[in-house]
Amino acid sequence: MKIGTTKERLLNAILLAERIVGKKESLPVLSCILIEANDREVTLSATNLEAGVDIRLPAEVEESGVVAVSAHVLAQTIRSISGDKIQLKTEDSNLLIESRGTKTLIKAVPHNEFPALSTSVETKGIVVSRENLLRGIQSVSYAASPSMIRPELGSIFISLSTSGMITAATDSFRLAEKVLSNTAIKEDQDILIPLKHALELTHVLETIDSETVTLQLDESQIAVLSDGIKIGHVRYVSRVVDGQFPNYKEIIPKSFTTEATVLKNDFAEMLRKARIFSGNDQHVGLHIYPNRKIFSATAQSNDVGEMSDSVDAALTGDDIDINFHIGYLNDCFTSIQSDSIILGFSGPARPVVIRGVSDANFTYLVMPLNR
């Protein structure tokens, strides 16, 4: 193998692939990036067996070939090179890197053990906005369970329909839903992507520079394809969960007995103060008394002390005292594109629903604590 390319394009591709590599000591080739040169392009591939990525870059290919080297070593080596032009070639089955008078030899791993990335059976695919897909996953990912004991709760739900795209996640204690438009497809599709791979996908979507991506789906996997200027052709493949996402629409209250409209920053600051005094439990009590125009929060800990704080709010409905986990309430703020938020309560043992005053496309639900 003998190829020439630019440092910037090569490094961008390597750093993207490095995020996907596996870490199984029993199969060292999983910690490698596979470099294949053919015709007028070079392909970099990485996989952890459950997900994988390949990136096709334009390059000056003098000799075709293939080599697998440590992703970490390769990334550090290319990052340290000062020259703009880089030449890669194999020497005694290892990888020799040359640029502006510098030479580096990286020991290779037998590439015949590298797992082949599977190809989706779907041919046409679904074209969606890259920004919408990225924003949809980021808006809800924190609400998914970090455990895969119940795979449907440890995944991001993506629903594509003729009317748009919906992303949702829940760990059974809270739920986040984001509704996005500009996705017109002929047939409805529901996808469950494991949280780990959804987060990997967000990194891919942040790195590429194309306006749209193509989704190819089958029963066992999703492939996300992109063609951009910054890197080149990128294909990210992940397994999908064979399960049913909870019918969460049924648990979202349709009406509220108490509502509070408050500035998002004021509520966030009130929770920040409560966190200091809430101890390990991280519990906060919310007290809403519309007739007295009181919206306050209390927290206490035997080790730290106790606090009570109030903020200005527009209140309607019945008095209510209710307790929540501070982290669950706080997590949603970055997903709400509005300066003011509405908290809707349906009773002491019912969940709170949080929405932005000017952001009707995001819904967040948190279950109360029994206390």
Image (spheres, rainbow, N blue to C red):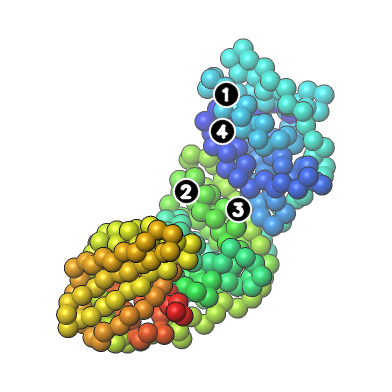
- Of residues 181 and 121, the one drawn nearer to the viewer in this rendering: 181
Residue drawn where x is 63% and y is 15% of the image: 102
Which residue is disc 3 drawn over? 236
Which residue is disc 2 drawn over? 206
Q: How many numbered marks have been drawn onto this rendered protein structure?
A: 4
Where disc 1 sits, the SS reads: helix
Q: Earlier in the sequence, mark 4 or mark 3?
A: 4
Residue drawn where x is 65% and y is 40% of the image: 44
The residues tagged by marks 2 and 1 sit, at their Cα atoms, a distance apart of: 23 Å
Question: Of circles 2 and 1, which is in front?
Answer: 1
Does residue 173 appear anywhere in the picture? yes
Residue flagged by tag 4: what amino acid is it?
Leu
- Of residues 269 and 280, the one drawn nearer to the viewer in this rendering: 280
Q: Earlier in the sequence, mark 2 or mark 1?
A: 1
The residues tagged by marks 2 and 3 sit, at their Cα atoms, a distance apart of: 13 Å
Given the current orientation, which residue lies at the most extreme top position? 101
* Disc 2 residue crowd, few under 14, some 14–19, many 20+, Cα 10 Å: few
* Disc 1 residue crowd, few under 14, some 14–19, many 20+, Cα 10 Å: few
Question: Of circles 2 and 3, which is in front?
Answer: 2
The residues tagged by marks 2 and 4 sit, at their Cα atoms, a distance apart of: 15 Å
* Disc 3 residue crowd, few under 14, some 14–19, many 20+, Cα 10 Å: many
Contact (CB < 8 A) between labels 4 and 1? no
**Res 80 quadrant in image:** top right
- Left or right of 262 in this view: 208: right
Residue drawn where x is 54% and y is 71% of the image: 171
- Left or right of 149 in this view: 370: left
**Res 99 quadrant in image:** top right
Where disc 2 sits, the SS reads: helix
Residue flagged by tag 3: what amino acid is it?
Tyr
Which residue is disc 1 drawn over? 80
Q: Earlier in the sequence, mark 2 or mark 4?
A: 4
- Left or right of 331 in this view: 102: right
